[in-house]
Image (cartoon, grey):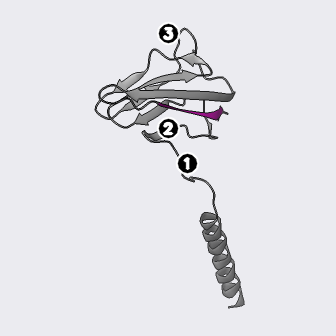
Amino acid sequence: MPYRLIYIGLGLTAIAAIALGIAFSTEGEAIDLPRPLESVSPQPGDLVPPQTILEIDLEVGYDAEIHVDGWPLADVTFIEGTGVYRWAPSASNPNVQEWTPGKHTVRVVWDTYAGLPDPGSFEWSFRIG
Protein backbone atom coordinates (compact mmCIF):
# COMPACT_ATOMS: atom_id res chain seq x y z
CA MET A 1 0.00 0.00 0.00
CA PRO A 2 2.71 2.64 0.80
CA TYR A 3 4.41 2.00 -2.56
CA ARG A 4 1.24 3.23 -4.30
CA LEU A 5 1.50 6.56 -2.50
CA ILE A 6 5.15 6.84 -3.55
CA TYR A 7 4.24 6.18 -7.21
CA ILE A 8 1.39 8.69 -7.07
CA GLY A 9 3.71 11.29 -5.53
CA LEU A 10 6.38 10.69 -8.19
CA GLY A 11 3.78 10.91 -10.97
CA LEU A 12 2.40 14.20 -9.65
CA THR A 13 5.92 15.59 -9.32
CA ALA A 14 6.69 14.66 -12.95
CA ILE A 15 3.47 16.28 -14.18
CA ALA A 16 4.22 19.44 -12.19
CA ALA A 17 7.76 19.61 -13.62
CA ILE A 18 6.48 19.27 -17.20
CA ALA A 19 3.78 21.89 -16.64
CA LEU A 20 6.30 24.37 -15.18
CA GLY A 21 8.69 23.73 -18.08
CA ILE A 22 5.98 24.53 -20.61
CA ALA A 23 4.77 27.58 -18.66
CA PHE A 24 8.22 29.16 -18.40
CA SER A 25 9.51 28.19 -21.84
CA THR A 26 10.89 31.13 -23.88
CA GLU A 27 10.66 29.38 -27.25
CA GLY A 28 8.20 30.75 -29.74
CA GLU A 29 8.38 34.34 -28.57
CA ALA A 30 6.90 36.69 -31.14
CA ILE A 31 9.30 38.90 -33.06
CA ASP A 32 8.45 42.49 -33.90
CA LEU A 33 8.50 42.83 -37.69
CA PRO A 34 8.06 46.15 -39.50
CA ARG A 35 4.92 46.60 -41.57
CA PRO A 36 4.36 45.31 -44.36
CA LEU A 37 6.48 42.28 -43.41
CA GLU A 38 4.07 39.65 -42.06
CA SER A 39 6.49 36.81 -41.29
CA VAL A 40 9.95 35.42 -42.00
CA SER A 41 11.30 31.91 -41.75
CA PRO A 42 13.72 31.01 -40.31
CA GLN A 43 13.15 33.60 -37.62
CA PRO A 44 15.92 35.83 -36.24
CA GLY A 45 18.31 33.84 -34.09
CA ASP A 46 16.91 30.42 -35.06
CA LEU A 47 19.16 27.36 -35.35
CA VAL A 48 17.93 25.37 -38.37
CA PRO A 49 19.00 22.34 -40.45
CA PRO A 50 20.76 22.70 -43.84
CA GLN A 51 17.55 21.75 -45.74
CA THR A 52 15.89 25.00 -44.62
CA ILE A 53 13.78 27.00 -47.08
CA LEU A 54 13.88 30.78 -46.76
CA GLU A 55 10.36 32.24 -46.69
CA ILE A 56 9.38 35.91 -46.59
CA ASP A 57 5.74 36.95 -46.38
CA LEU A 58 4.90 40.54 -47.34
CA GLU A 59 1.50 42.16 -47.58
CA VAL A 60 -0.01 41.85 -51.06
CA GLY A 61 1.00 44.78 -53.28
CA TYR A 62 4.69 44.84 -52.34
CA ASP A 63 7.72 43.78 -54.34
CA ALA A 64 10.92 42.62 -52.63
CA GLU A 65 14.62 42.31 -53.34
CA ILE A 66 16.23 39.61 -51.19
CA HIS A 67 19.93 39.26 -50.36
CA VAL A 68 21.54 36.33 -48.54
CA ASP A 69 24.99 36.97 -47.08
CA GLY A 70 25.28 39.99 -49.37
CA TRP A 71 24.36 38.06 -52.55
CA PRO A 72 21.21 39.12 -54.46
CA LEU A 73 18.78 36.28 -55.16
CA ALA A 74 17.40 36.08 -58.69
CA ASP A 75 15.80 32.62 -58.57
CA VAL A 76 13.19 33.30 -55.88
CA THR A 77 9.72 31.79 -56.19
CA PHE A 78 7.04 34.45 -55.73
CA ILE A 79 3.36 33.70 -55.12
CA GLU A 80 1.67 36.96 -56.11
CA GLY A 81 -1.75 36.23 -54.61
CA THR A 82 -0.26 35.79 -51.12
CA GLY A 83 2.87 37.95 -51.22
CA VAL A 84 5.09 35.00 -50.21
CA TYR A 85 8.67 34.65 -51.46
CA ARG A 86 10.41 31.25 -51.14
CA TRP A 87 13.98 30.30 -51.85
CA ALA A 88 16.42 27.50 -51.12
CA PRO A 89 20.02 27.07 -52.25
CA SER A 90 20.45 24.98 -55.39
CA ALA A 91 23.24 23.74 -57.62
CA SER A 92 22.00 26.04 -60.40
CA ASN A 93 22.37 29.20 -58.27
CA PRO A 94 25.56 31.05 -59.25
CA ASN A 95 26.18 32.43 -55.73
CA VAL A 96 24.72 30.13 -53.06
CA GLN A 97 24.63 26.41 -53.90
CA GLU A 98 24.06 25.15 -50.33
CA TRP A 99 23.64 26.38 -46.78
CA THR A 100 26.99 26.16 -45.02
CA PRO A 101 27.15 25.67 -41.25
CA GLY A 102 27.24 28.93 -39.32
CA LYS A 103 25.59 32.32 -39.36
CA HIS A 104 23.67 33.62 -42.40
CA THR A 105 22.26 37.12 -42.86
CA VAL A 106 19.17 37.94 -44.90
CA ARG A 107 18.23 41.44 -46.03
CA VAL A 108 14.86 42.25 -47.57
CA VAL A 109 14.23 45.57 -49.32
CA TRP A 110 10.65 46.29 -50.39
CA ASP A 111 8.43 48.88 -52.03
CA THR A 112 4.93 48.93 -53.46
CA TYR A 113 4.58 48.08 -57.13
CA ALA A 114 1.50 50.27 -57.59
CA GLY A 115 0.22 53.43 -55.95
CA LEU A 116 2.19 55.56 -53.51
CA PRO A 117 5.74 54.42 -52.68
CA ASP A 118 6.24 52.75 -49.29
CA PRO A 119 9.89 51.63 -49.20
CA GLY A 120 11.51 49.79 -46.31
CA SER A 121 13.95 47.09 -45.35
CA PHE A 122 14.62 44.47 -42.69
CA GLU A 123 17.73 42.43 -41.91
CA TRP A 124 18.12 39.41 -39.64
CA SER A 125 20.43 36.46 -39.03
CA PHE A 126 19.97 32.78 -38.29
CA ARG A 127 22.32 29.84 -37.91
CA ILE A 128 22.62 26.58 -39.82
CA GLY A 129 23.46 23.72 -37.45
Q: Which residue: 67% across, 80% down?
A: 7
Quadrant of the image occupied by residue 97? top right
Point out residue 59 in the picture as x, y percentages from the top left corner. 36, 37
Region of the chain picked out in magenta, as a range: 120-127
Quadrant of the image occupied by residue 15? bottom right
Does residue 98 lie above or below 127 as drawn?
A: above
How packed mark 2 is, by other alpha carbons closer than 10 Å (few <14, some 14-19, many 20 or more), is some
Q: Earlier in the sequence, mark 1 or mark 2?
A: 1
| Residue at mark 1 | 31
In the rendered view of the protein, which quadrant contains the N terminus? Answer: bottom right
Does residue 32 lie above or below 128 as drawn?
A: below
Q: Which residue: 63% across, 35% down?
A: 126
| Residue at mark 3 | 92
In the rendered view of the protein, which quadrant contains the C terminus? Answer: top right
Q: Nearer the viewer, residue 9 or 22?
A: 22
Mark nearer the viewer, 2 or 3: 2
- Secondary structure character of the magenta stretch overall: strand
| Residue at mark 2 | 40
Q: Residue furthest bottom?
A: 1
Q: Earlier in the sequence, mark 1 or mark 3?
A: 1
| Residue 96, numbered circle | none
Q: Nearer the viewer, residue 41 or 37?
A: 37
- Residue type, mark 1 in image: Ile
Q: Which residue: 55% across, 37% down?
A: 42
Point out residue 73 in the picture as x, y percentages from the top left corner. 50, 17
